[in-house]
Image (spheres, rainbow, N blue to C red):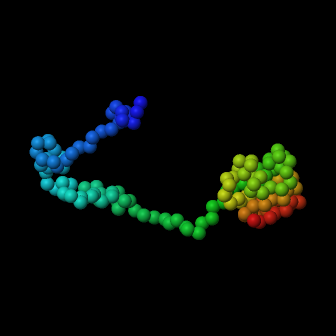
């Protein structure tokens, strides 16, 4: 094997169609574009979503609603899950890092604690938001609520 006998693999290199190089090539004349019309002209490009003059789908379907750019998405965690984590991992402080290790939230999630379930353990809970019922339940179990 030398540099002078290197070849690409068989069938990996294709020669491109030479269009518009005279009648003898078999691809002269209309150059594979058919006869007349906008599509045969140079510089033609069809508008995105064009349906041949029929009213396009994006104009037939009505618009409604809006996206609130100020919306804050929280990952919801119920206090019954906090109780389960406290029992399994034997921890007294629960923060987003503990919840991430337990597989309940992802790295950049904001955490909101909700009040579904029952909490018996005395916990210090750190989260970005709390529902009223969750805060009451944590404080009723002599725990503390820390807003991040």
- Tell me residue 22's x, y (percent): 12, 47
131 vs 18, nearest the viewer = 18
Q: What quarter of the picture does the C terminus occupy?
A: bottom right
Vertical position of residue 2 compared to residue 85: above or below: above
Q: How many marks?
A: 0
**For the point 27% across and 57% down, which residue is it?**
46
Would residue 35 appear left or right of 89 to someone viewing this image?
left
Please tell me which residue is depicted at 63% across the width and 61% down the height of the picture: 73
Image-based side of 110 in relation to 46, left or right:
right
Q: Where does residue 119 sit, x and y in percent of width and height?
A: 83, 53
Whether 66 is drawn above or below 46: the answer is: below
Residue 60: x %, y % from top left: 35, 60
Q: Is residue 6 above or below residue 129?
A: above
Quarter of the figure with residue 63: bottom left
Q: Quadrant of residue 55?
A: bottom left
104 or 40, which is in the foreground? 40
Residue 86 in sight from this viewpoint: yes
Residue depicted at x 71% and y 60% = 112
Q: Residue 53 occupies which quadrant of the picture?
A: bottom left
Pick whichever, 133 or 146, lies toward us. 146
Looking at the figure, which quarter contains the N terminus? top left
Q: Is residue 34 visible?
A: no
Locate residue 118, reporting x and y percent: 81, 52
Residue under the point 74% across and 49% down = 101
118 or 47: nearer the viewer: 47
């Amino acid at each position: 094997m030398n540099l002078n006998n290197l070849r690409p693999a068989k069938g990996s290199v294709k020669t491109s169609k030479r269009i518009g190089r005279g009648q003898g090539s078999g691809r002269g004349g209309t150059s594979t574009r058919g006869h007349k019309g906008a599509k045969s002209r140079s510089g033609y490009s069809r508008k995105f979503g064009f349906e041949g003059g029929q009213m396009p789908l994006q104009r037939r379907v009505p618009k409604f609603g809006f996206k609130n750019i100020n919306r804050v998405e929280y990952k919801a965690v119920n206090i019954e899950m906090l109780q389960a984590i406290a029992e399994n991992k034997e921890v007294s402080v629960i923060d987003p890092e503990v919840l991430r290790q337990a597989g309940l939230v992802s790295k950049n999630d904001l955490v909101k604690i909700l009040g579904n379930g029952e909490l018996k353990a005395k916990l210090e809970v750190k989260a970005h938001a709390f529902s009223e019922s969750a805060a009451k339940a944590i404080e009723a179990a002599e725990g503390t609520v820390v807003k991040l």
